Amino acid sequence: MVEVKDITFSYGKHSILKGISFSAEPGDCVGILGNNGVGKSTLITCMNSIRKPDDGSVLINGKSIFEMSRLELARNVAYVAQKNELSQTTVYDAILLGRKPYMTWSMNCADYALCDEMMERIGMTDFKLRNINELSGGEVQKVMLARAFVQQPKLLLLDEPTSNLDPRNQYEMMKLVRQMALEQGISVLVVIHDLNLALRYCNRFLFIKDGSVYDYGDGSVVTEKALRDVYGINASLVIHDNKKFAIIK
């Protein structure tokens, strides 16, 4: 279980996060929703110790991430940024780096098998020996997601993971994220701007407005009022094939 308690963060005198609190169970996929600049990306970088919050705590199964060693943190938390800078390496080696927190003297057969499985699941087996610098932005994003999954974390943080993907790959990637969260018991937090993509694949929703939690919960918290208050948009919510969709007016 992941618990976020009263996280606050400021840049100088400018307050960004104001007492953010919520929790997520294993298998949850939490969509972090809100306009640009409200602190969504700042929140997830506070949740993996890239940034040190001014106050508050992040607990994984009762233990603070701020008390974990770098190795323990890497075994518990994986992070995929919106933009990734990678050195000259093959696709396979880039994914294999996700096993580094578990490596002793060398990789073993189980490490290689896990990487092969993930390459197949993201549809990039044929790219195995391709230099990562030769890939498109969307392909790189797939590689980074695969690396995060072979890391086998308890908490996966995704910052706009579908931003460089076409619609088909957006849905395929989020479908994989949802499946892996359930299969591996991972708590996933994803910063996402596509409301309908979030509604389709997330089971929990964290609305952030002006650096504070506007609302948090299951699909019932996604209301026309919430979209109006948080985003300043008028939208209709409709049900089709037992799924909720937002239609912006």
Image (cartoon, grey):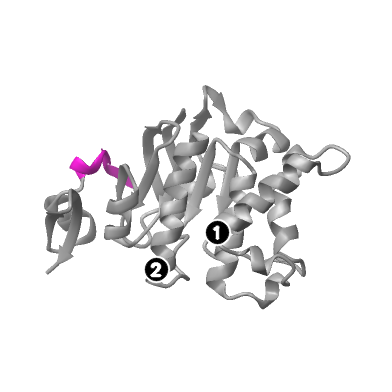
In this picture, is 22 found above or below 180?
A: above
Q: Earlier in the sequence, mark 2 or mark 1?
A: 1
User: At which x and y percent is residue 111?
Assistant: 74, 43
Seen from the viewer's position, the closer of residues 49 and 73 is 73
- Residue 216 lies in magenta, yes or no? yes
Please state the extent of the stretch shown in magenta in the rendering: 211-221
Asked if residue 93 lies left or right of residue 142, the reply is right
Q: Residue at x 62, y 57 (%)?
A: 119
Residue 50 appearing in the image: no
User: At which x and y percent is residue 7?
Assistant: 44, 37
In this picture, is 20 found above or below 176?
A: above
* Mark 1 crowd level (few <14, some 14–19, many ≥20, 10 Å Cα): some
Which amino acid type is marked by label 1? Answer: Ile
Say the numbered circle drawn on residue 122.
1
Which amino acid type is marked by label 2? Answer: Arg
User: What residue did someone put label 2 on?
Assistant: 168
Seen from the viewer's position, the closer of residues 14 and 63 is 63
